[in-house]
Amino acid sequence: MKLSTKGRYAVMAMADIALNANGAPVSLAAIAQRQDISQEYLEQLFGKLRKKKLVTSVRGPRGGYLLAKQPEDIVVADIVLAADEPLTVTRCQDGDAVSGCIGGDKCVTHELWAALGRQIYGFLAAVTLDDVIAKRNLALQASIRRAKAGPTTIAVGG
């Protein structure tokens, strides 16, 4: 699986806001310049992030965007999914081999890729935006959070 620019840029932009807001809205122009991302591309992404209530917009000359929640309350998986980034690694059209793989049946490696997709989702769901901007050991943070959460069932296009 390759994470496309949508998911990566959305996380980069959200991290930029978390680092640079200081209580004031951050303009897309400022994010675009600091992160070397097209402002037009960011406008598309921020429409999706706003729709999923991850950011709020402020209009006016000093307008821009703020995080809708504290960085420790935003998990990376939510940002990636808000950007319409699929977190499946199977070749199935719908992720569950009902209409995908081979004639509606699971291919021989389906369970391998489905399990990998669940691991990726589990990792991204256990890492917060605060972990990213604090440059914590993300694998360790994710492991700790998953251990504290206890056993859960994660269903991701498998």
Image (cartoon, rainbow, N blue to C red):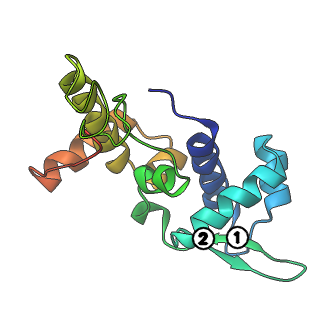
Q: Is residue 97 above or below residue 9?
A: above
Say if 138 sits above or below 90 in the image: below
126 vs 83, nearest the viewer: 83
Q: Name the residue carrying label 1.
A: 65
Asked whether residue 141 appears in the rendered view, the answer is no
**Residue drawn at (68%, 69%), measured in percent from left and top?**
22
Q: Position of residue 29 (x, y in %)?
A: 85, 58
Q: Is residue 121 left or right of residue 8?
A: left
Depth order, front residue of 142/55: 55
* Side of 4 where 17 appears, left or right: right
Mark 1: amino acid? Tyr
Which quadrant holds the C terminus? top left
Dot 2 lies on which element? helix
Does 26 appear above or below 144?
Answer: below
Distance, label 2 to label 1, CA atoms, is 9 Å
On the image, the x and y values in percent for residue 121 come to 33, 42
Name the secondary structure under disc 1.
Answer: strand
- Classify 10 Å Cα crowding around label 2: few (below 14), some (14-19), many (20 and above): some
Q: Quadrant of the N terminus?
A: top left
Residue located at (75% from left, 66% from top): 26
Write down the quadrant of residue 118 in the picture.
Answer: top left
Q: Is residue 153 visible?
A: yes
* Relative image position of residue 134 (x, y in whole percent): 50, 47
Mark 2 vs 1: CB contact within 8 A: yes
Q: Is residue 56 above or below residue 154?
A: below
Q: Residue furthest top?
A: 108
The residue labelled by disc 2 is: 50
Taking depth in this image into account, of 39 and 27 the one nearest to the observer is 39
Amino acid type assigned to the residue bearing label 2 in the image: Arg
